[in-house]
Image (cartoon, rainbow, N blue to C red):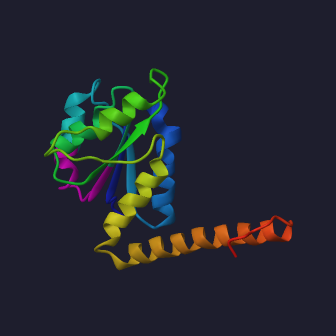
Amino acid sequence: MHPIVGIIMGSDSDLPIMQSAADILKEFGVPCELTVVSAHRTPHRMIEYAQQAKARGLKVIIAGAGGAAHLPGMIASVTTLPVIGVPIKSSNSIDGWDSVLSILQMPNGVPVGTVALNAAKNAGILAAEILGTFDDAIAEQIASYKTRLSSEVIEKVERLKKEGHENKFD
């Protein structure tokens, strides 16, 4: 199936984080592609990727980057597709804050949806939710996923009760 979500990262060292976006999209049945596109080391590749994304059938782009983290914003500047930025705490990062702020503080007119530090899974979920606004099958997968999350919490509540922990809420 042709990918409809592009997952890009500034370096292959970001793959352990960004893989979770691909994994959750696969769970939802959303075809995606995953590649390295560096804003600083391959700027022409970055621009070509962003400019051709829509024509290639992509509907959302997830871009992860650490340090100066220019990739999500630069991608957003040359495409009309929604871009979700994943700030990554990299080896040259200042506890990840440099990445968070670089992606979060985009100028008016060039929005990038930003998830929490290293939260590529949330980026995948958000991409699926965006797609689910016009694809009922994806929307049903998201609803099922959220029902499972709720059930897991209730199971934990019941386990704590059985272990004798006081619960004044119930």
Q: Position of residue 169 (x, y in %)?
A: 68, 71
Q: Give the quarter of the figure containing the N terminus.
A: bottom left
- 146, 58: nearer the viewer: 146
The answer to whether residue 39 is above or below residue 108 is above
- Answer with the quarter of the image where residue 167 lies: bottom right
Front one among 69 and 18: 69
**Who is closer to the viewer here, 151 or 130?**
151
Residue 59 is covered by the magenta coloring: yes
Q: Where 144 sits versus 27, above or below? A: below
Camera-side residue of 112 and 101: 101
Q: Is residue 60 left or right of residue 21?
A: left
Quadrant (top left, top right, bottom left, bottom right) of the C terminus? bottom right
Q: Is residue 35 visible?
A: yes
Please state the extent of the stretch shown in magenta in the rendering: 50-61
> To which quarter of the image does residue 107 belong?
top left
Q: Residue furthest top?
A: 92
- 43 versus 84 height, above or below: above
Residue furthest to the front: 168
Give residue 157's quadrant in the image.
bottom right
Residue 135 place in picture, x, y as percent: 32, 75
Residue 102 placed where, x, y %?
A: 31, 33
Residue at coordinates 80% horizontally, 70% vertically from top-left?
Answer: 161
Q: What residue do we see at 44% from left, 35% from top? A: 88
